[in-house]
């Protein structure tokens, strides 16, 4: 478990004992997990780096990047110049190009999903060539992923929909929220006015429990 310190902006790793945390990274532009690996973008966006697993030492594995997206399907990064997305091939230490720029991306346990720049369509990448994308949904504001599913917020009222794995078929998952984060078992929703955090189940949508008060955003490890 990791957390960004609110004052120093360092990334801290939990040592397994309440109150005990150790620095693992100086401030960085972004962090992401893929499998059991932790990655970051340098604070100046000049490089993608992988944590060595102890202390605060990191290894450069890639060049400039804007954003990282990690999940069971791999680690992906967008180029700061043209927004195109690349996948990290750890075996070859190489970043093959997989798709054009998008307004948002999300990674599940099996697939990468992308939202077109005008947010009018959601596509799924099936691996392989950069042309291996097919449409699975229409307009959305943002994408969110759990290990098993991809979710999208609607552009009208910000409701959350879950992709049913059948093209163009999306099921209601939550009423509107200012922000969402999703794990294998739970959906966490920040109320539209950001006054409360709620927890719901990915398996039985509709039942929510308030678990926190005001927040700016919500985040959780998959």
Image (cartoon, rainbow, N blue to C red):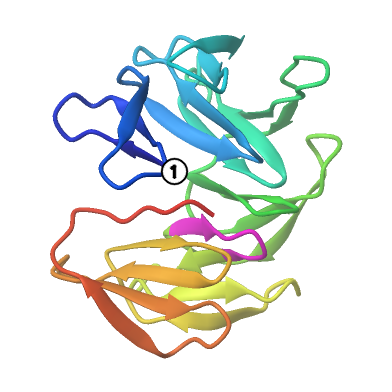
Task: Please report the residue visible at 40 percent of the width from the left and 90 percent of the height from the top.
Answer: 207
Q: State whether residue 116 is above or below residue 67.
A: below
Furthest-front residue in this view: 17
Magenta-drawn segment: 142-150
Q: Residue at x 77, y 24 (%)?
A: 89
Question: Residue 4: x percent and y percent?
Answer: 29, 35
Question: From this viewpoint, is residue 83 visible?
Answer: no
Please report the residue visible at 62 percent of the width from the left and 33 percent of the height from the top.
76
In this picture, is 5 found above or below 116?
above
Residue at 53% across, 22% down: 82
Q: Label 1 neighbourhood size at 10 Å, few (<14), some (14-19), many (20+)?
A: few
Q: Position of residue 125 (x, y in %)?
A: 75, 48
| Percent coordinates x, y for residue 60 in the rendering | 57, 9
Local SS, label 1 = loop
> On the picture, is 19 further left or further right than 111?
left
Identify the image quadrant of residue 208: bottom left
Quadrant where the N terminus is found in the figure: top left
Q: Is residue 166 visible?
A: yes
**Viewport quadrant of the C terminus:** bottom right
Left/right placement of residue 211 relative to residue 76 reads left
Closer to us: 25 or 149: 25
Residue 131 position by quadrant: top right
In this figure, which residue is indicated by the disc labeled 1? 1
Q: Nearer the viewer, residue 197 or 94?
A: 197
How many numbered discs? 1
Residue 24 at x, y percent in the picture: 40, 22
| 77 displayed left or right of 207 | right
Up/down of 196 relative to 171, above or below: above
Left or right relative to 156: residue 163: right
Q: Is residue 120 magenta?
A: no
Q: Is residue 188 above or below residue 171?
A: above
């Amino acid at each position: 478990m990791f957390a960004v310190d609110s004052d120093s902006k360092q990334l801290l790793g939990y040592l397994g004992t309440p109150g005990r945390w150790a620095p693992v990274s100086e401030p960085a532009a972004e962090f992401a997990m893929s499998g059991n690996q932790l990655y970051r973008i340098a604070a100046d966006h000049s490089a993608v780096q992988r944590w060595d697993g102890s202390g605060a030492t990191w290894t450069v594995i890639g060049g400039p990047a804007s954003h990282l997206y990690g999940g069971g399907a791999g680690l992906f990064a967008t180029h700061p110049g043209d927004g195109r997305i690349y996948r990290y091939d750890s075996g070859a230490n190489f970043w093959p190009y997989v798709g054009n720029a998008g307004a948002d991306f999300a990674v599940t346990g099996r697939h990468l999903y992308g939202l077109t720049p005008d947010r009018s369509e959601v596509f799924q990448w099936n691996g392989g060539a950069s042309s291996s994308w097919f449409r699975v949904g229409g307009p959305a504001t943002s994408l969110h992923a759990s290990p098993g599913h991809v979710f999208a917020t609607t552009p009208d009222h910000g409701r959350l929909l879950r992709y049913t794995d059948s093209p163009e078929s999306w099921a209601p998952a939550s009423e509107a929220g200012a922000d969402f984060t999703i794990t294998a078992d739970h959906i966490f929703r920040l109320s539209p006015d950001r006054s409360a955090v709620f927890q719901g189940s990915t398996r039985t949508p509709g039942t929510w429990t308030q678990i926190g008060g005001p927040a700016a955003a919500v985040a959780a490890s998959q």
